[in-house]
Image (spheres, rainbow, N blue to C red):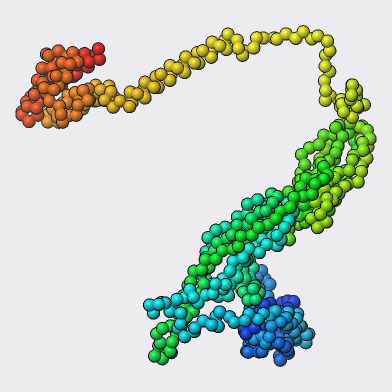
């Protein structure tokens, strides 16, 4: 029973929370409609309310100047959200009408009324421009399956789209500007037919301009406009803020775009039950914006020396340092330039400080907000400095000059004059020593504590304590040794590279090593009493040695050409005959029975023969 009562209690609290959340939401009642329509073109007007209205309290406007084709059509919706323990409920009520303009002109759509909880809410009156387009190309096109090609096949959908149904225009805010004066340009697509895709063929190019991209990829700027007496759906594709950097006539190059439009035509074939249907075709249409020229005027002559290129309208605020502080203390002079113009190019004004002041790097902070009318915000410059000498100093006003295009004149802003009183440094432990020389004032040269040590005067007759190593005998000896070692290493590396590139030479040098490895393998077979493997490995060692040594493939080796090669290299005929005998013994013994002692004799004689041949060839 207690659990049931608890559930009822929680349910009641939830309902109260829902109604309190709904009641706490601010009620809005708004109207939406195209701002530009054509005579004979039906359009929708929607009145949207975010709360539940009182029953039968909605009062539409009179719709004077329009014929009501349909409406009101009421659509409702509600949603409940529970986030982080909070319950919110939202309503949506929409009253929709379809209107048809009666005549061209500017007509104001009156306010609609509705009541919520007894309180009356009204929409704002909405002006609508009605344009008379005359005879529309769409009205003259055949609608009963016309527009077929000459062969009666697929319909000629290209002719269904008029030449001016899809346009791409470069809309420039001004045709004549000063150098560094902002200029807004947007590439806008004008369409009177539906489309499904946009394929960019070229990107905007601004030669001679500094450009700032204002496009927002998350928010498409669409609307309706009248151009050449016709109503178009518009969409801004590219949006830029330009600052001309050159004087003369600058050109904004065209942008190419392919628009894939949709054309609906009546089907050639008729269904026996439903009659003729419709077919939808995607038609690509290439469009190009016009080439636009902008005249850039030079800034007037006679600019003050404090002008650094700022163009626009600005104000200057300064935050001055304390008028009295001790020497060797840090202070900051702050200047804030605010306004609208080429803030990105605004440079820090020059701060005139006495020569005894140490000025450090200027710290810059900024807030830049680009828009179609220009860049607004501020740039703040902080000048940290340290006064090194006590005294009284007069700081001249800081000047910032900009060019105002509207007034066509240079405007100079100045800070107020400043007098600084620098007191002695309390941490110095005494008065500072001042050196005054010819043409020097005490503000120019000042000794502070232990900053400068005593300089001995007269002829000091300084002598070196030891001979420097540079350009000494040891230096030149070490340098010669390094050069000799370098040349020797270089020559050795070159020789090794040449030998590594000679494959025959490498094989010849490795012949004896490879033969020794094979002899060791043959000895292992001999100890295992594997006669067949022993003689086979001996043949590989002997023939392989001759192949590597004489750079002759094994397949081309014979006893005759081996004897000939050995004779060329000075090997005696007895050793040549011994090689032939060993080869013959191995061939015969490989497949004939023999005692194991015979293998030992063949092994010893083969090793001794290769050693003798290697010793003769190396000489």
Q: Can residue 103 be seen in this view?
A: yes
Residue under the point 91% across and 32% down: 390
Does any portion of residue 330 appear in the rendered image?
A: no
> In the displayed structure, would residue 155 be above or below residue 168?
below
Estimate the x, y position of residue 380 in percent, counting from the top left.
Answer: 79, 49
Identify the image quadrant of the C terminus. top left
The image quadrant of residue 11 is bottom right
Q: Is residue 369 left or right of residue 441?
A: left
Name the residue located 49 percent from the left edge and 16 percent from the top edge.
483
Expressed as whole percent of the image width and height from the top left, the position of residue 165 reads 56, 73
Q: In this view, does 483 lie to the left or right of 374?
A: left
Q: Relative to the observer, which residue lies in front, 375 or 466? A: 375
Q: Position of residue 359 (x, y in %)?
A: 81, 36
Residue at horizontal 91 percent and vertical 46 percent from the top = 416
- Label count reads 0
- Judged from this view, the residue extending furthest toward the left is 592
In the picture, the quarter occupied by the N terminus is: bottom right
The percent coordinates of residue 460 (x first, y second) are 79, 9
Can you say whether 212 is above or below 59 in the image?
Answer: above
Q: Residue at x 55, y 66 (%)?
A: 287
Toward the viewer: 458 or 141? 141
Left or right, residue 463 beside residue 276: right
Q: Quadrant of residue 5?
A: bottom right
Above or below: residue 528 compared with residue 178: above
């Amino acid at each position: 029973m207690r659990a049931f009562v608890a559930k009822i209690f929680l349910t009641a609290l939830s309902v109260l929370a829902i109604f309190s959340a709904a009641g706490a939401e601010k009620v809005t009642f708004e109207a939406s409609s195209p701002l530009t329509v054509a005579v004979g073109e039906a359009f929708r007007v929607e009145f949207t309310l975010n709360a539940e209205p009182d029953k039968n309290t909605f009062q539409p406007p009179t719709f004077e100047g329009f014929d009501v084709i349909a409406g009101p059509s009421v659509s409702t919706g509600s949603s409940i959200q529970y986030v982080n323990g909070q319950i919110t409920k939202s309503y949506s009520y929409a009253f929709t009408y379809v209107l048809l303009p009666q005549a061209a002109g500017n007509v104001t759509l009156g306010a609609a009324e509705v009541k919520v909880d007894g309180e009356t809410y009204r929409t704002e009156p909405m002006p609508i421009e009605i344009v008379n387009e005359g005879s529309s190309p769409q009205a003259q096109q055949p609608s009963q399956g016309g527009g077929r090609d000459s062969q009666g096949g697929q319909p000629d959908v290209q002719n269904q789209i008029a030449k001016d149904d899809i346009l791409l225009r470069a809309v420039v805010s001004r045709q004549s500007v000063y150098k560094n004066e902002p200029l807004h340009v947007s590439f806008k697509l004008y369409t009177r037919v539906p489309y499904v895709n946009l394929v960019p063929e070229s990107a905007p190019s601004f030669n001679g301009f500094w450009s700032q991209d204002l496009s927002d990829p998350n928010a498409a700027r669409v609307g309706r406009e009248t151009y050449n007496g016709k109503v178009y759906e518009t969409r801004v594709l590219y949006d830029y803020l330009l600052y001309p950097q050159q004087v003369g006539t600058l050109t904004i190059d065209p942008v190419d775009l392919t628009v894939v439009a949709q054309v609906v035509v009546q089907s050639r074939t008729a269904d026996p039950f439903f009659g003729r249907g419709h077919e939808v075709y995607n038609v690509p249409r290439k469009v190009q914006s016009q080439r636009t020229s902008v005249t850039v005027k030079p800034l007037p002559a006679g600019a003050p020396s404090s002008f650094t290129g700022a163009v626009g309208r600005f104000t200057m605020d300064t935050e001055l340092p304390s008028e009295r502080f001790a020497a060797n203390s840090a202070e900051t002079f702050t200047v804030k330039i605010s306004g609208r113009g080429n803030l990105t190019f605004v440079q820090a004004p020059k701060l005139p400080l006495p020569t005894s002041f140490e000025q450090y790097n200027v710290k810059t902070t900024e807030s830049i907000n680009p828009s179609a009318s220009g860049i607004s915000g501020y740039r703040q410059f902080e000048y940290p400095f340290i006064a090194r000498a006590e005294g009284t100093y007069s700081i001249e006003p800081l000047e910032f000059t900009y060019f105002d295009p509207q007034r066509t004149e240079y405007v100079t802003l100045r800070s107020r004059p400043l007098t600084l009183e620098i007191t002695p440094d309390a941490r110095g432990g005494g008065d500072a020593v001042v050196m005054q020389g010819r043409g020097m004032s005490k503000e120019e040269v000042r000794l502070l504590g232990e900053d400068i040590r005593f300089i001995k005067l007269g002829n000091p007759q300084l002598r070196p304590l030891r001979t420097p190593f540079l350009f000494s005998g040891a230096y030149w000896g070490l340098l010669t040794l390094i050069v000799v070692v370098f040349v020797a290493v270089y020559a050795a590396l070159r020789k090794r590279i040449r030998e590594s590139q000679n494959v025959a030479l490498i094989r010849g040098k490795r012949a004896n090593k490879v033969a020794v490895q094979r002899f060791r393998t043959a000895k292992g077979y001999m100890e295992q009493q594997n006669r067949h493997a022993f003689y086979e490995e001996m043949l590989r060692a002997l023939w392989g040695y001759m192949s590597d040594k004489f750079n002759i493939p094994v397949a081309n080796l014979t006893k005759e050409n081996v004897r000939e090669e050995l004779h060329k290299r000075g090997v005696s005929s007895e050793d040549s005959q011994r090689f032939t005998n060993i080869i013959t013994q191995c061939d015969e013994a490989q497949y004939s029975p023999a005692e194991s002692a015979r293998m030992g004799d063949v092994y010893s004689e083969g090793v001794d023969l290769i050693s003798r041949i290697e010793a003769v060839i190396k000489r």
